[in-house]
Amino acid sequence: MKQKKELLILIVLLVIAGNVWYWFFFRERPVSTVGTVSVAQSYKPLPVENPQPHWPQLESASKTEYKSNGRNIFSVIAPPPPEAQRIVPKTSTPIVVPTPPPPMVAPLPVKFFGYGTVPSGSGRRAFFTDGEDVYIVSEGEVLLNRFRILKIGNVNLEYEELASGLRGIAALEEQAAPPSA
């Protein structure tokens, strides 16, 4: 009796395994369109006016002949340049080409009249005046939205014009002491 039950269970399991095997390998699967884009849907032809071969241009291209200039196109190393013929000028005086002067940075529109430090250990601060207005600027800060103060020294300061990137130096202008009464 026990052997018949085991044989019956074996047959049922084989039938189930056969159905599962058939289900995965032989049934027709529906095409899922959710989340996938086919190539035909995203195809856009190139905007070419005349897709036919241009025979005259092909014939002229096939008749061209490669003319080498002596360089091996398969070599990474370039050949040495050909020796240029030296032309000796007829005049005995050498021709001097004047070099253009370096570009000038705009001068500061304010007067640099002093510098100081804060006791907390921060960097130097420069003092500028423009009539009644006084500006106090640290190294690295921007003055008048036009000039960046680079370095504050004892007798001058270095600045950079933001628009052009040119650098300049402004000297410390000492004011004469007022006459004593």
Image: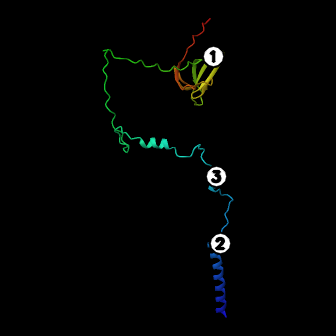
| Quadrant for the C terminus in the image | top right
Identify which residue is drawn at 43% across, 19% down.
99
- Work out which residue is located at the far bottom of the displayed protein and give it: 1
Element on which disc 1 rests: strand
Which residue ends up furthest to the right in the rendered image?
Answer: 34
Query: Whole-percent x and y of residue 52?
Result: 55, 46
Q: Tell me which label, 2 or 1, sits earlier in the chain.
A: 2
**Which is nearer the eye, 3 or 68?**
68
Q: Quadrant of residue 36?
A: bottom right
Mark in front: 2 vs 1: 2
Q: Quadrant of residue 6?
A: bottom right
**Closer to us: 167 or 72:** 72
100 relative to 43 in the view: left or right: left
What amino acid type should be assigned to the residue bearing mark 2?
A: Arg
Compared to 7, does 96 lie above or below?
A: above
Q: Which residue is mark 1?
A: 130
Q: Left or right: 64 with respect to 107?
A: left
Work out how far the residue at label 3 is from the one at label 1, CA to CA, in angstroms: 67 Å
Task: Please tell me how crowded label 2 is: few (under 14), some (14-19), or many (20+) other residues with Cα within 10 Å.
Answer: few
Q: Amino acid at mark 1?
A: Asp
Which residue is the extreme one toward the front?
A: 56
Label ID, residue 121: none
Residue at numbered disc 2? 27
